[in-house]
């Protein structure tokens, strides 16, 4: 009887040992590396989408430095941007287009547009296109940093093409999330430091 119990215990221990060997076999472990790779690929894709969005906004913006603090400057920069991208043969542009652009790009709502450029011609529902030269900015991403408050600080290398010549510079731009904007973000500030001048 004791021998039977001893044999039974030995067999039970042997079976338990074989199960632990099987479960410890690395070939049976779950491979998480493919899941990790998928997550890192998804993150990289999201970063590329954000970079493309920020670049699109910067390359269509004509307001930098102190222009972002002046309603009149912002309006005139918006008019320039809309004329350059859409083209117009008229001396006026629809107010609604300027209002949409200012909100989507900068999150700015101008309450009294007719008071802007008060010494220039007026037309109800339209803004006069002030004749002036303009500078074109072409950005490339240098870095994108997510801030603690959810905003992004984007540093770009910028080629500046103006009637005075071409310059190279660095722009530092703050983007904040705005789910009501067509871009999903607004430019809050954007400062350019020029580093070189080409004739």
Image (cartoon, rainbow, N blue to C red):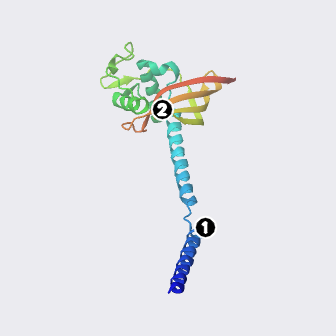
Along the line of sight, the residue nearer the viewer: 154 or 99: 154
- x, y percent for residue 124: 29, 23
**Mark 2 Cα within 10 Å, few/some/many (few <14, many 20+)?**
many
Position of residue 18 relative to residue 107, above or below, is: below
Residue at position x 57%, y 56% in the image: 37
Contact between labelled residues 2 and 1, with CB atoms less than 8 Å apart: no
Callout count: 2
- x, y percent for residue 77: 46, 24
**Residue that badge 1 annotates:** 26
Q: Is residue 131 visible?
A: no
**Residue that badge 2 annotates:** 175
* Sooner in the amino-acid sequence: mark 1 or mark 2: 1
Quarter-of-image position of residue 73: top left
Mark 1, secondary structure of its residue: helix
Disc 1 to disc 2, C-alpha distance: 47 Å
Mark 2, secondary structure of its residue: strand
Position of residue 91 relative to residue 39, above or below, is: above
Q: Quadrant of the C terminus?
A: top right
């Amino acid at each position: 009887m004791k021998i039977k119990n001893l044999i039974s215990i030995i067999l039970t221990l042997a079976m338990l040992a074989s199960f632990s060997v099987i479960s410890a076999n690395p070939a049976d472990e779950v491979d998480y590396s493919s899941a990790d790779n998928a997550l890192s690929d998804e993150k990289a894709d999201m970063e590329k989408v954000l970079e493309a969005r920020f670049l699109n906004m910067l390359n269509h913006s004509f307001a930098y430095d102190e222009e972002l603090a002046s309603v009149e400057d912002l309006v005139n920069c918006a008019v320039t941007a809309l004329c350059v991208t859409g083209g117009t043969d008229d001396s006026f542009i629809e107010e609604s287009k300027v209002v949409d652009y200012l909100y989507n790009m900068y999150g700015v709502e101008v309450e009294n547009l007719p008071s802007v450029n008060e010494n220039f011609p007026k037309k109800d529902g339209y803004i006069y296109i002030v004749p002036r030269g303009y500078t074109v900015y072409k950005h490339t991403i240098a870095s994108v940093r997510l801030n603690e408050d959810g905003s992004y600080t984007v540093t770009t290398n910028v080629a500046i093409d103006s009637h005075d010549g071409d310059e190279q510079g660095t722009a530092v731009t703050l983007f904040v999330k705005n789910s009501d904007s067509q871009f999903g973000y607004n430019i809050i500030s954007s400062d350019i430091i020029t580093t070189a001048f080409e004739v």
